[in-house]
Image (spheres, rainbow, N blue to C red):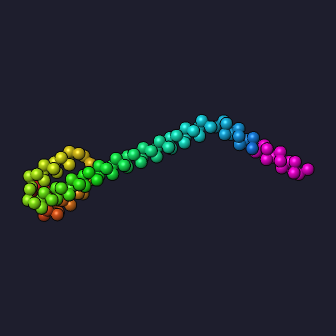
Amino acid sequence: MNQIFNEIDDDLKQDRFLNFIKKYKFVFIIIFSIFFFIIIFTVVKNIIYENRAKKYTQEYVIILSLINDKKITEAKEKLEILKEAKISSIEIPFCLILQAAKYSINDL
């Protein structure tokens, strides 16, 4: 007798679960879609930022080589181009370039 009640209870739980899924399936789909697009947006943004950072790092190496070769005017021009690019991490490499070249901000 107890087994029959357990089976009925299990069937009721299964029916409630299926009704819950049917009732809220669009909400689940929307939440999953938003989550999926947030992940894709974040990954694409990081890839773009890494590519820009790699490009600007190469530019900093070129500027350092110009400073070491005593081509200060060319280095100034390239630094101005990088300043106009408005990358958020430009201040730190700019200071590193000045320290490596042993010039002050006024000289460059």
Point out the stretch of residues depicted in magenta.
1-13
* Residue 30 image position (x, y, % from top left): 55, 38
Total labels drawn: 0
The verdict on residue 79 being magenta is no
Q: Main secondary structure of the magenta part?
A: helix
- Apparent side of residue 70 relative to residue 35 in the rendered image (left or right): left
Residue 91 appears anywhere in the view: no
- Apparent side of residue 29 relative to residue 60 in the rendered image (left or right): right
* Residue 108 image position (x, y, % from top left): 11, 55
- Apparent side of residue 60 relative to residue 42 in the rendered image (left or right): left
Residue 85 appears anywhere in the view: yes
Q: Which residue is nearer to you in this view: 66 or 7?
A: 66
Picture quarter containing residue 19?
A: top right
**In the rendered image, the vertical position of residue 95 relative to residue 24, given as above or below:** below
* Residue ranking furthest to the right: 1
- Apparent side of residue 21 relative to residue 45 in the rendered image (left or right): right
Residue placed at 10% from the left, 60% from the top? Answer: 69
Residue placed at 75% from the left, 44% from the top? Answer: 14
Residue placed at 63% from the left, 37% from the top? Answer: 24
* Residue 93 image position (x, y, % from top left): 23, 57
**In the rendered image, the vertical position of residue 72 relative to residue 38, given as above or below:** below
* Residue 10 image position (x, y, % from top left): 79, 47
Residue placed at 62% from the left, 37% from the top? Answer: 25
The verdict on residue 10 being magenta is yes
